[in-house]
Image: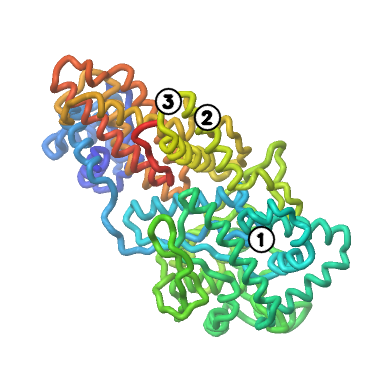
Amino acid sequence: MYNAKEEIAEELEKFFGIDVSLNDIEIPEPEHGDFAYPAMKAAAELGRNPRELAEEAVEALEEKLDVDRIEVAGPGYVNFYLDRSKFVKNILEHTRDLGFDSREEKVVVEHTSPNPNKPLHMGTMRCAVLGDTIARISDFLGYDVEVQDYINDLGRQSARSVYAYRNFFEELPEEDRSKKADFWVGQLYSKAGQHIEENPSEEEKVSEIIQEIEKGGNDTAELKDELVGKSLRGQLETAYRSNVFYDLLIFEKDVVASDLLDKAMDKLKRLDEVYEVEEGEDKGCLVINLSKFESELGEMKKPYKILLRSDGTATYTAKDIAFTMWKFGLLNHEFGYKKFDEQPSGDCLWSTGGEEEKSFGDAGKVINVVGAPQKFPMKVIKYSLKALGYEEAAEKFSHMHFKFVYLPGKVAYSGRKGNWVGKHGDAVLEKARELALEEIQDRYDFDEDKEEEIAEKVGTAAVRYFLLKYTREKDIDFSFEKALDWEGDSGPYLLYSVARAYGIEEKADVEPEFTRYEHEVEYELAREIERFESVVERSFEAEEPAKLCYYLKEMAETFNSFYHKCPVKGADDEALASSRMALVHGYINVMEEGLSLLGIESLEEM
């Protein structure tokens, strides 16, 4: 999109011969122009008088920039006054072709990564929606994007699911058995957890199941795979309903069964920072020395992290490092792949565990969307890469953490306790759809199919936007009342603003062509529209979709003011009506693109 601010920064940088960032360009009060640059910054670096430097800049830039005029103010401000009509026309023309040119860099985003033993709860939904959104933003910015979902199908939780199925499935009511598999597997898991808590000796049976699963080739391992597969497909249904999609499922059992870890360890053993402990309680363990990064990691009990225990078994640290190395293409390794599902998006979902050759991994940047409690393990991965000499990979490795989504009363979701029932992802999406349907039936007179279609999209928009609008550092108490507020900071409010814009287009029989504006709010709306791509870039850089949410809300509020003050049909003449219609079109283009980045499908009527 045309960016006057960017042009001004570039020309100032050429003139001064120093860096001038977009953040250096200010937006002053209207009477002082459209943009302003405090030449005091450049003067301090160049050892010059700020006022004199500003005057020289004005003289040099007047012929280079397509602006109405440039003036010096105060101690050394350079104020830029645009030809506003031309400025707005350029902005609106660029809204027809939003997005960035392709970049060579590949971004791998890993998100959701649920334990396949219960439905997606709202905390995991937050992870999925955040990850999906940052992937969509990456794609908009021109990156080659790959979305991975790591499935932890080994370990105690999978063994407990087998134990639960064998002991309690027959006790489940028929009504629950007929529901999605992730629901009844989750109920069984909760029942087993409570039973084992009351009968601790039963944990030994779970340990025996773990051994059978690890051995493989038996009924227990097959039952585990069957339960994992059924539960996972149930979770994916919830993800798809939320407009969340993936490229690759990576099963932990396939990672363990492959020679990925062996290849990583063979490579790491040759490096100076990896060594075997010769004495003490960790004698015989292979470790990585992280002592020089203690200030970044925090005080550590030991100056190293164990990779291989003395019996040769790998730690989670070793597995995480090896898997991350594969993501960056630092290991000569590929899994075999197979088609797992055809997603509603039309894209094929692949998984490990097959025999087909595909090109996955080999990223330039890796974003792991994982909860805040995993900050330390994620730091260990980052600084292990650094210690091993993979400086670029370490810099391009990112932990996009987030905080909790709580049940009422600050109660955390618990699979073992089963307090997710009725408040899990499916239940929340369905309740949001029902509330949206009630509102639509009260407000409008659509046929039944149309009501259902709109209600489904509004409900999904309400849930996604609510999970995205809070910064990642904030805990969330989910509220249907706030999520479905049609007049406030919500997904339905944004959807309604787009539908209102389409309504103007339908009622006003005029072609969009901008030539002029009369009301200040028209110019304000154009300025909001112009900010879109820079806001998307900042959202990516900060890995913070809340920035985009806040921007879209502000733009919708400006459009609402425009709607009430600047009618298209009631314009003084056809040229003004055409200009306003061009603004309406520009708003629709940008808002629809912005909503799409949030994973929200826009509506032409509601």
Q: Is disc 1 placed on a helix, strand or loop? A: loop
Residue 387 relative to residue 184: left or right: left
Q: Quadrant of the C terminus?
A: top left
Q: Is disc 2 placed on a helix, strand or loop? A: helix
Q: Residue at left 64%, top 66%?
A: 227
- The residue at which mark 2 appears reads as 438
Q: CA distance from mark 3 to mark 1?
A: 41 Å
Q: Is residue 247 above or below residue 433?
A: below
* Residue 304 position within the rendered picture, expressed as x and y whole percent measured from the top left: 66, 71
Q: Residues within 10 Å of mark 3 (few under 14, many from 20)?
A: few
Q: Is residue 95 above or below residue 314?
A: above
In front: mark 3 or mark 1?
3
- The residue at which mark 3 appears reads as 444
- The residue at which mark 1 appears reads as 117
Q: Residue at left 23%, top 33%?
A: 54
Q: Is residue 251 above or below residue 594?
A: below
Q: CA distance from mark 2 to mark 1?
A: 33 Å
Disc 3 residue type? Tyr
